[in-house]
Image (cartoon, grey):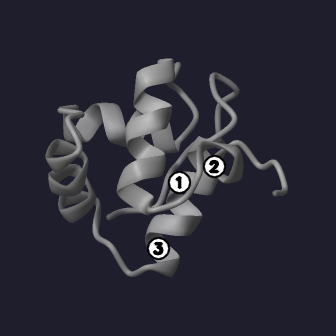
Amino acid sequence: MKPRKNPPGNKNMIGAKVVALRKARKIKQKDFLAKLQTVGLDISPTSLSRLEGQYRLVQDYEIVAIAKALDISVEELLGKKR
């Protein structure tokens, strides 16, 4: 994946965390998209890229699916401590 040319946007608060968690687990974007599909979220590569870059709003059901795909709680994804 090529590096972003523009700084992160401000449309969501989870994009940077999704990227960090995905990369820490060494999951490629296309593999993460497949994992999202297995938990019931079908989004395009462009939508995921925009979500990660914080240029796209995130729906509540998407937050739940992303947390499930990353095997973390919604609270952790939102940056809250347990």
Image spot of residue 73 (x, y percent)? 59, 52
- Residue displayed at 28% across by 69% down: 28
Label 2 belongs to which residue?
A: 77
- In 3D space, how far apart are the residues under numbered discs 1 and 3 (Cα atoms)? 8 Å
Q: Determine whether the residue tagged by mark 2 lies in a helix, strand or loop.
A: helix
The residue lying toward the viewer, choosing from 12 and 73, is 73
Could you tell me which quadrant the N terminus lies in? bottom left
Q: Residue 27 vs residue 14: left or right? A: left
Residue 30, percent from left and from top:
19, 59
- Determine which of the numbered discs, if any, sits on residue 40 in the image: none
Please name the amino acid that badge 3 sits on: Lys
Q: Does 13 sit above or below residue 76?
A: above
Which element carries disc 3, helix, strand or loop? helix
Q: Is residue 6 above or below residue 33?
A: above
Label disc, if present, on residue 23 of the rendered structure = 3
Percent of width and height locating residue 55: 53, 27
Q: Which residue does the image show at 49% across and 44% down from the upper left? A: 52
Q: Residues within 10 Å of mark 3 (few under 14, many from 20)?
A: few
SS class of the residue under badge 1? helix
Measured in 3D between alpha carbons, the distance from the residue under mark 2 to the one under mark 1, in whole angstroms, is: 8 Å
Dots 2 and 1: beta carbons under 8 Å? yes
Determine the CA span between mark 2 and mark 3: 15 Å
Of 59 and 28, which appears nearest the observer? 59
Taking the spot 49% from the left edge, 34% from the top edge, the residue there is 63
Where residue 69 sits, quadrant-wise, is: bottom left
**Image quarter of the C terminus:** bottom right
Q: Check disc 1 and report the residue beneath it.
A: 18
- Give the mark nearer the N terminus: 2 vs 3: 3
